[in-house]
Image (cartoon, grey):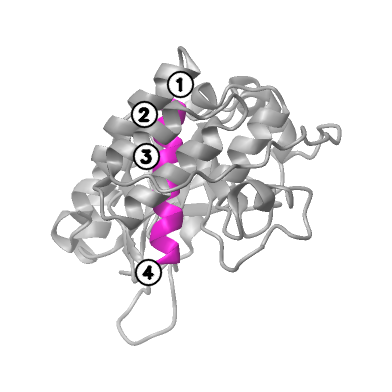
Amino acid sequence: MGSTESRAAYALQALHRGFHVFPVEPYEKTPHTLYPGQPYTLRWSEAATSDLGRVVEYWARWPSANIGIACKASGLLVVDCDMPKREYQLADTRYAELHDRFGPLVDGTDVFRHICELLGKDWGETTDTYRVCTGSMGCHYYYSWPVEIRATQAPEPSQASIVKGIVDIRSGGGERGGYVLGNGSATTKGPYWAENDRPVRVAPPWLVALCRADVEPFKAAPAVPFRRPGRTGNLSGLVATVESASQGNRNQALLWAARSACADGTPMENAIEELSAAYTAVHGDGGARQAEQTIRSAYRLQGRKA
């Protein structure tokens, strides 16, 4: 995945999605240097292109280059959900309560999901969009700017973080906007790979408003403390844990069960199959997508802890 031999193919895939791309240093996040041994790099905002000929030329010259995606030129709003860099990273934010629910390590996807819940939005619908898992096991959620914003050239929001270092925004703020590494890239922390092949969803109005800091302050709903189960044995015991979880405690139980499965060496796809079925059975319609997201988040967290 993301081998240097296939980087050109991944760049062309991004081009096919309508993204403007440019070459990035292999295993880095910085624009590609122009000449070996010299510090001069591409002016990435000018180099970014959707022209097939230029893209072929770039990766013919630098076949091992990572794929940079220019968000402003591509009309993208990317929500960058990262892994926690330290314990209790949310302690001084409005989301500190999540540590009571999930423990000392809370990743960006958990915070993003929590924001959806607070605003009364459907998590499955919100995340039904193109997603890329990052080298550090975070996740990029891709959205496109609403037509009316692009058509009227209305000012796009700054790239101020929703929660700095945990839920960041890459979009069209400022003169150049921001960029992300695309599917098929790789850093020293690992490869970037697409979690799905879905279309890029139009950013919902509440997300646009949140990025613009236009939303009214909202209060967190009372958290239901997670009651950690006793010994569960194998995967079937973890399934029973999810099935027996009380209302208001099911998502926390699923997260805990998935982290336990990861710690036990259970392949993630097996956990998704077994635990998602258990969660959906007690959660009702529409639970499968949320279950899969929670399990993937749990494996990212547990992998970070390991």
Mark 3, secondary structure of its residue:
helix
Per the rendered image, the range of residues in magenta is 289-306
Task: Decide whether residue 199 is among the magenta residues.
Answer: no
Cβ–Cβ below 8 Å for labels 4 and 2? no
The front one of 299 and 259 is 259
Q: Identify which amino acid the numbered label 3 is placed on.
A: Leu
**N-terminal label among 1 and 3:** 3
Mark pair 4, 3: CA separation: 47 Å
Magenta-colored segment: predominant secondary structure:
helix
- List x then y, in percent, for residue 202: 53, 24
- List x then y, in percent, for residue 95: 73, 48
Residue corresponding to mark 3: 238
Mark pair 1, 3: CA separation: 18 Å
Comparing marks 4 and 3, which lies closer to the viewer?
Answer: 3
Q: Residue at x 39, y 44 (%)?
A: 258
- Whether 85 is drawn above or below 208: the answer is below
Residue corresponding to mark 2: 276
Query: What is the number of the mark on residue 287?
Result: 1
- Whether 56 is drawn above or below 255: the answer is below
Residue corresponding to mark 4: 32
Mark pair 2, 1: CA separation: 8 Å
From the viewer's perspective, tell me whether residue 222 is left or right of residue 115: right
Q: Identify which amino acid the numbered label 1 is placed on.
A: Gly
Comparing marks 4 and 2, which lies closer to the viewer?
Answer: 2
Comparing marks 1 and 3, which lies closer to the viewer?
Answer: 3
**N-terminal label among 2 and 1:** 2
Is the residue marked by circle 4 packed among few (<14), some (14-19), or many (20+) residues within 10 Å?
many
